Image: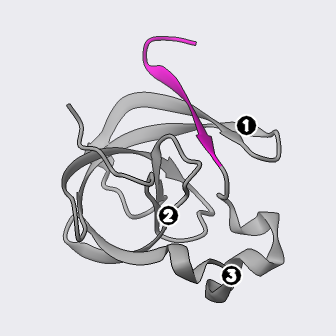
């Protein structure tokens, strides 16, 4: 692994894993609305995540930072995703956040339980 790569874990990520995952009532206690770059998006909090993820297409090309993350899923699979820096605003947080850019995300964003700004 190079210095431009990191390792992260996520519990629930892709909609294709389980047909029931696209039903909001399954996750209603963990769904919220936040702003990403000023745009309202739905997020699904993943208490097992070690890095925030953003659905591909919500980022801007200039927000990619040249880094990547190897993501390890609860089902034992892994994948490498590019990282981007996006502005996130929620009820208790506002700031720049480094996110994995992931296709097929269950919701628009999967923040860590507590989003932390980039240092």
Looking at the rendered image, the quarter that the N terminus falls into is top right
Closer to the chain start, of discs 3 and 2, is 3
Prevalent SS, magenta region: strand
Left or right? Give the position of 67 relative to 28.
left
Closer to the chain start, of discs 1 and 3, is 3
The residue at 70%/68% (across/down) is 15
Between marks 1 and 3 in the image, the one whose residue lies nearer the viewer: 3
Q: Secondary structure at mark 2?
A: loop
The residue at 49%/58% (across/down) is 56
Alpha carbons under labels 3 and 2: distance apart: 13 Å
Q: Position of residue 29 (x, y in %)?
A: 54, 79
Which residues make up the magenta segment? 1-10
Q: Which residue does the numbered mark 1 point to in the structure image?
A: 78
Residue 45: mark: 2
Q: Secondary structure at mark 3?
A: helix
The residue at 30%/55% (across/down) is 60
Residue 20: mark: none
Alpha carbons under labels 1 and 3: distance apart: 24 Å
The one nearer the camera, 117 or 38, is 117
Q: Position of residue 6 (x, y in %)?
A: 50, 24
Q: Secondary structure at mark 1?
A: strand
Alpha carbons under labels 2 and 1: distance apart: 20 Å
Q: Which residue does the numbered mark 3 point to in the structure image?
A: 26
Between marks 2 and 1 in the image, the one whose residue lies nearer the viewer: 2
Tags 2 and 1 touching, CB below 8 Å? no
Residue 44 painted magenta: no
């Amino acid at each position: 692994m190079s210095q431009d790569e990191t390792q992260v874990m996520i519990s629930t990520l892709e909609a294709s894993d389980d047909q029931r995952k696209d039903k909001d009532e399954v996750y209603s206690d963990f769904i919220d609305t936040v702003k990403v770059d000023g745009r309202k998006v739905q997020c699904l909090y993943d208490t097992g995540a070690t890095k925030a993820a953003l659905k591909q297409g919500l980022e801007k090309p200039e927000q990619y930072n040249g880094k990547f993350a190897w993501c390890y899923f609860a089902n034992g699979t892994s994948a490498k995703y590019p990282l981007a820096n996006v502005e996130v605003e929620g009820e208790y947080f506002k700031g720049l956040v480094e996110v994995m850019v992931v296709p097929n995300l269950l919701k628009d964003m999967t923040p860590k339980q507590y989003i932390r700004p980039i240092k």
